[in-house]
Amino acid sequence: MQRHEFDYSTTLEERLIDLARKVRADMETLPPCKRRDDLIQQLREVEAGVEWNPFR
């Protein structure tokens, strides 16, 4: 099995912060509902990932 290597032009932290911004923007446009709750949970997980990032 051959490994696939990815060549990212941005760091993991930058990608996570960008994802958090997108999720937050999507979340703010929705009224209270299940989808919004799911986005809130995803945002918490992304923010935890930014804080935990060992590559800083």
Image (tube, rainbow, N blue to C red):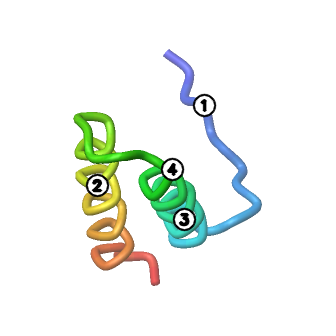
Q: Amino acid at mark 3?
A: Arg
Q: Secondary structure at mark 1?
A: loop
Q: Give the CA separation, mark 2 to mark 4.
A: 10 Å
- Residue at image location 51% in from the left, 50% down from the top: 26
Q: Nearer the viewer, residue 2 or 23?
A: 23
Q: Residues within 10 Å of mark 4 (few under 14, many from 20)?
A: some
Q: Secondary structure at mark 2?
A: helix
Q: Give the CA separation, mark 3 to mark 2.
A: 12 Å
Q: Which mark is residue 26?
A: 4
Q: Secondary structure at mark 3?
A: helix
Q: Nearer the viewer, mark 1 or mark 4?
A: 4
Q: Residues within 10 Å of mark 2 (few under 14, many from 20)?
A: some
Q: Nearer the viewer, mark 4 or mark 3?
A: 4
Q: Amino acid at mark 2?
A: Ile
Say above or below: 35 vs 48.
above
Dot 2 corresponds to which residue? 40
Instruction: Looking at this view, name the residue that lies furthest to the top.
Output: 1
Q: Which mark is residue 4?
A: 1
> Pointer 3 and pointer 2: residues touching (CB < 8 Å)?
no
Residue 13 placement (x, y as % from top left): 51, 71
Dot 3 corresponds to which residue? 21
Q: Give the CA separation, mark 4 to mark 3.
A: 9 Å
Mark closer to the chain start, 3 or 2: 3
- Residue at image location 50% in from the left, 51% down from the top: 29
Mark closer to the chain start, 2 or 4: 4
Q: Give the CA separation, mark 2 to mark 1.
A: 32 Å
Q: Amino acid at mark 1?
A: His
